[in-house]
Image (tube, rainbow, N blue to C red):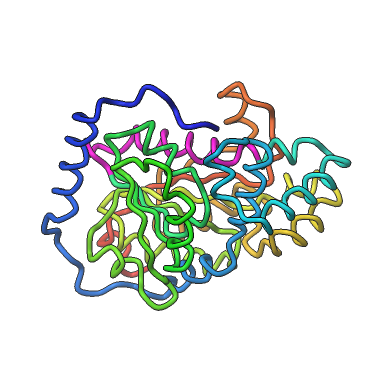
Amino acid sequence: MKPRKGRLSSKKVMGSWIYHKKIMVQTHPLLTTYDLTGAWVLGHNQRVTASELFAGARAQLLPSRLTEALSTLNGRISARTMLLLANTIDDTVANYASFRSSGIIEATRRVLHRVPTLSPVVVNPQTGYSATSIWMAEEMPHVYFIDIDTPETIADKQKRLSWYHLPQNLSLKGVGLSTTPLHEALRGFRPDVIEAIAAFCTADDFAHLLRYLRHVLVEGGWVIAPFPYAPGIENLSRNLTLFQRFAGKPRGVVESFDNIYRIMEVAGYHNIEILKLSDLAQDLDKPIPADIEVIAIAQALPLEETQTD
């Protein structure tokens, strides 16, 4: 995916940026207590992310100066090896690697259509070397994006992108979420949408994370949660072992959509929708990928409705 051309005029972009700056410094009602039980998962995700692998795959499959800059040598080597092995089994693996960002972007579009705020805020707490928020910020100048990762990763990412004119409605924040909870990193500001990855923790731990995120989100805020999907992985035969080798064992793999609904409902969410990558690709007229992941979108219930959960 390449950055879209034909951006808004600099005057309009600056106006959007000034508006976003204003909302970020507004006084918001801060919660006096947070359910921190699952907050640690975000820091854990920062440490075990497969971002370098995905960035390497994007550089191979979606070549551009941007995707090349965001890829590391190790990531490119691992991705090249994985894709060579995978393509001997099923070329939908390569389609998955090239389409995953587009799937996240389409899921975000669908969530933002349901957010009533004129200038919503979207947070990715484990951005890694992803270009996804850059592409979305260029496409949607009315939305403010906050990408967070460890100080080391963000510093390296900024260095790699020193030549690139980042959209003004995108902020990169270097914060280690193992030691600083997300709500402190956001200084109490409550975003409209948060992306949370389910791959690297158990279902119980992820449910605790989702409970914590209800305290961080605005009332009625949304989460976007990619889940490793067992049927999609198992249909690729040997690729389960292949992906464990290169991306780590997906502890959060789910066996069915019912598992996802149960996790979301227990954590206090409703309006749950599960999006298969293959369906999204068909909607966008893209090559059909393997459903190695599915993306759940869900809206947080008001905290007072589930205080005794």
Residue sitting at the far front: 163
**Point 74% across, 54% down: residue:** 77
Between 268 and 141, the one nearer to me in the picture: 141
Q: Where is residue 73 in the image (x, y as percent from the top left)?
A: 67, 56
Placement of the C terminus among the 4 image quadrants? bottom left
Residue 226 rendering spot, x and y as whole percentages = 55, 50
Residue 16 lies in what quarter of the image?
Answer: top left
Asked if residue 109 is among those painted magenta in the image, a careful observer would answer: yes
The residue furthest left is: 27
Percent of width and height locating residue 23: 16, 49
**Residue nearer the viewer, 164 or 167:** 164
Indicate yes or no whether the magenta region holds residue 25. no
**Residue 6 picture quarter:** top left
User: Closest to the observer: 218 or 79?
Assistant: 79
Relative side of 111 to 127, left or right: left
Q: Residue at x 42, y 54 (%)?
A: 124
The magenta-colored residue range is 98-120
Most common SS among magenta residues: helix
